[in-house]
Amino acid sequence: MRSTKFITIAVLVFAFAAAVSAQKKPVFTSAYTSLGTGCKDLKGGEGQDDAKLCPGVGGYQVRVYSSAEALFINAEKKGTDESSPIVNVGLDFNESKVKLEWRLANGKPFAVIIRVPTYDGREDDEPGMGKKIGEELFVSGIGNWEYISESVSTKTPNANVKARSVADRAYQP
């Protein structure tokens, strides 16, 4: 009788430990947002540029707007003031042909991956970002994960897989 209780307790402890271990490892998936379709144009007020809002996932939307020298892409949490900068690019960037990849951990977004140009830099008296010299996949954390900020050259073999791996490895629950 006593050994049966010990075995039962041992089995329960093992099952609990296995369940806790299984909960700690997140399941990573992706969802996508086109910055060219389904977006709503917003007219700027006095002293503001026009912008557009694109649908996102997990309560987020994407705001695309410009300044005198750059185009800004941010993830915004609907109904809050929470905004996470994703990337700034040159005004020649055609966002209408871009898909934003959301990385999700257990169905909740924590990072985005976007294909953007790389530039050679510019002199202080030159407008814009400089001459386009290539492309990269930029990995940017959102919300509590804004510390994620890394890029992968599109010339890297399996660049998309590597960019996902960069995001997933940096994720801390």
Image (cartoon, helix red, strand yellow):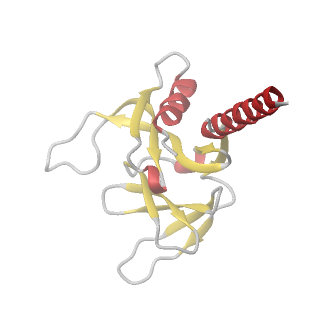
Residue drawn at x 44%, y 58% as measured from the top left:
84
- Using the image as rendered, state which of residue 64 and residue 172 is in the foreground: 172
Q: Is 120 positioned to the left or the right of 106 in the image?
A: left
Q: Residue 97's x, y, as percent?
A: 59, 44
Residue 41 sits above or below residue 173 on the image: below
Q: Is 114 positioned to the left or the right of 36 in the image?
A: left
Q: Is 39 positioned to the left or the right of 69 in the image?
A: right
| Image quadrant where one finds the N terminus | top right
Q: Residue 23's x, y, as percent?
A: 66, 40
- Using the image as rendered, state which of residue 77 and residue 48 is in the foreground: 77
Residue 96 sits above or below residue 48 on the image: above
The residue most toward the front is 1
Q: Residue 68's x, y, as percent?
A: 31, 62
The residue most toward the bottom is 46
| Number of callouts | 0
Q: Residue 113's x, y, as percent?
A: 52, 40
- Using the image as rendered, state which of residue 108 and residue 99 is in the foreground: 108
Residue 153 sits above or below residue 90 on the image: above
Q: Quadrant of residue 79?
A: bottom right
Residue drawn at x 47%, y 70% as measured from the top left:
50
Q: Is 155 positioned to the left or the right of 102 in the image?
A: left
